[in-house]
Image (cartoon, rainbow, N blue to C red):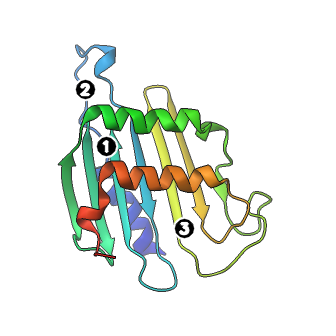
Amino acid sequence: MPRLSRFFALVSVCACAAPHRATDAPSDVISAVTLVRGACFGTCAQYALTVSSDGGVVFVGFAHVRTRGLARAHINPTNARVLIARFTEANFVGMWEQYLPGQTSCGLYATDAPIVELSLVTPTLYKKVVHDYGCGSAPTVLRELQAAVDATGESSRWLPAR
């Protein structure tokens, strides 16, 4: 587990947007979503992907990926903002913070599934949801948001071919 903790610490450092000067207008403030896919029983890709409202994309490959370490890209900022807006539409802030075994939010549980963290950062909000894929009661929209982050951030460019 210490290795995974170091990974999440690295992601936190690498995924942050550049600091803004005090003279920046409020519209220049960056919002972002981050997806962190953890280990499973097998060879699940382990990585973090951050998509910022300015179109910045940061990928950190950890294991079972084509690109290990830090990679950056840029996408259309409109696509990034549409992705971030989906979190509001899905009531992401109203979701449980954890869908983990042993918790009411989990429901029926199947072992050996990956754990995925999804977070949203805006100028006024930080929300993170930790989701064990083995939890049967997690909302379907949570997986849809996770897939949308992958699709919008074009993570496939750094992942093994399927």
Q: CA distance from mark 3 to mark 1?
A: 22 Å
Q: Which amino acid type is marked by label 1?
A: Cys
Which sits earlier in the primary sequence, circle 3 or circle 1?
1
Quarter residue 115 falls in: bottom right
Q: Please give the residue where the numbered disc 1 appears in the rendered image.
A: 16
Residue at position x 63%, y 54% in the image: 140
Residue 12 seen: no
Residue assigned mark 2: 20
Q: Which mark is residue 79?
A: none
Circle nearer the viewer, 3 or 1: 3
Give the amino acid type for the residue marked by disc 2 in the picture: His
The residue drawn where x is 53% and y is 52% is 144
Marks 1 and 2: CB-CB under 8 Å? Answer: no
Q: In the figure, is residue 136 to the left or right of 120? A: right
Q: In the image, is 16 to the left or to the right of 107?
A: left
Seen in the picture, residue 104 relative to 109 is either above or below; the reply is above
* Residue at mark 3: 115
130 with respect to 69 (left or right): right
Q: Residue at x 65, y 72 (%)?
A: 134
Q: Are marks 3 and 1 in contact (CB under 8 Å)?
A: no
Q: Position of residue 98 (x, y in %)?
A: 65, 55
Q: Give, as a three-letter code, the residue at label 3.
A: Ile
Give the structural element (helix, strand or loop) at label 3: strand
- Name the quarter where the C terminus is drawn: bottom left
SS class, disc 1: loop
Q: Residues within 10 Å of mark 3 (few under 14, many from 20)?
A: some
Can see residue 146?
Answer: yes
Q: Residues within 10 Å of mark 1 (few under 14, many from 20)?
A: some
